Image (cartoon, rainbow, N blue to C red):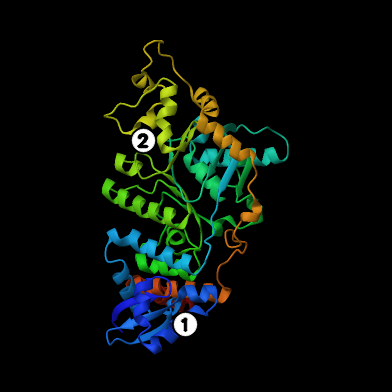
Amino acid sequence: MEFGGYMSHSIVSRTSRDTFQEDDEQALKWAALERLPTYDRARTGLLHGVAGDFREIDLKKLQIQEKKALLNRLVGSVDKNEEYLKKLKKRIDRVSLNLPTIEIRFENLTVEAESYVGSRAIPSVFNYYLNLTEGIAKCLHIVRSRKEKFSILRNVSGIIKPGRLTLLLGPPGSGMSTLLKALSGKLDSELKISGKVTYNGHEMHEFVPPRTSAYISQYDVHLPLLTVRETLTFSAKCQGVGTGYGEMLVGPVKAFFMDNISNGLDSSTTFQIINSIRQSIHIFNKSALICLLQPPPETYELFDDIILLSEGQIVYEGPRECVLEFFESMGFRCPETKGVAEYLQEVTSRKDQRQYWVNEELPYHYVSVNEFAEAFKSFHVGRAIQRELVTPFNRSKNHPASLTRSKYGASMKELMKACFSREVTLMKRKASMLIFKTIQLEFCAIIVATVFAQAKEAS
């Protein structure tokens, strides 16, 4: 069926609805929609065909071609994405649906690891067996471990607020990936963790973090034989059970942690992706913490808040507009010809810091990360964050749908059906290789059978 237009109970304006009153049949259909329960009313609409007829449809039951035609009409280009999201939010507001939001707090978060250093860290056969033997002896309390302890994150605290897009900056090795994994519940169990991470005042053991938040890794872990549509379709069937990008687009999560998602992308594509994410975060009050190594200036300006991490400590956290003010209070200024993101990553470095010193009245001296972190606590933005952390989150304001407490979003039957369908698709894509392997095995079997037959005759 071709689409001449699409009108729902909430998107159509009052003026447009007045015109429908002239047709009694249409007026009755609209009146029937208004009597539906809230959630049913939100996903029910009237489909307008080219013949001028209207039929009531459930948006969840549209066929693929109908969904495609509908989206092409609503979102004809990338520039209309924000307009479409605003219409969708307006529709949700008109049926009195309160969208769930998540505020993530982390207090005194410390992450430590143990590792071999020097020649013992080299992955060799000798070191493997030596480490294995030492591990057994350690369990028997015969020898002490020779692993050295490292602090990846050191007593960091902060708040990720809903409706604000937060940029995580820092030099390589500063602990950015570890912070993202800690907040999303993806940390390795071998790491030693202390401190507290809460979602709307609830600790991590009170819900299922992998289904409440989405961690998007910097590494591609998708199946190369599946198309983008097939990957997202599989994630949708499993209700967001995947590796990150599926949850971001089709999953029910409201908090996103993205680790260097601009790898391999040009600045224009990065800007478009971050801008689309920003629109979704602002309109639907989602929470997002995005790590980018060297964002271009136009992309940097899209973010609301900045978290600057260095040597496992938070040097600054707060509004983007106040970050330069903080470093100027410490005697450092960003040149007009320098990108702010690049400046922030260099101002805490011992080898690059001197060029930004502007306090001519005092001789330059290296300001360590510890000094920056302590100074931020007395900065007005740092004091405001500390006051918020002291006040506990009001758990009565938590939306019932904010936190997911079930491990799976679909029944075992639906999950098995989705996995079986995906494996059939993969087998079809690898049909030539599978046929070759089958013929190869049959050929080898015939040769082995012939050898045994000849051996039997000889005996």
Res. 314 in view: no
User: Going 42% across and 28% down the picture, which residue do you hit?
Assistant: 325
**Tally of marks:** 2
Q: 165 and 38: which one is in front?
A: 38
Tell me which corner region of the image, top left, top right, bottom left or bottom right, holds residue 405: bottom right
Q: Residue at x 30, y 61 (%)?
A: 80
Q: Which of the pair 346/43 is nearer the observer? A: 43
Which mark identifies residue 31?
Answer: 1
The residue where tag 2 is placed is 341
Sort mark 1 into few (<14), some (14-19) or many (20+) by Cα contacts within 10 Å: few
Q: Amino acid at mark 1?
A: Ala
Q: Position of residue 179 (x, y in %)?
A: 52, 42
385 and 149: which is toward the camera: 385
**Labelled disc at residue 39:** none
Give the image location of residue 231, x and y in percent. Answer: 40, 66
Res 333 seen here: yes
> Dot 1 lies on which element?
helix
- Residue at position x 35%, y 47% in the image: 262
User: Alpha-carbon distance for marks 2 and 1?
Assistant: 54 Å
**Foreground residue among 424 and 5:** 5
Q: Residues within 10 Å of mark 2 (few under 14, many from 20)?
A: many
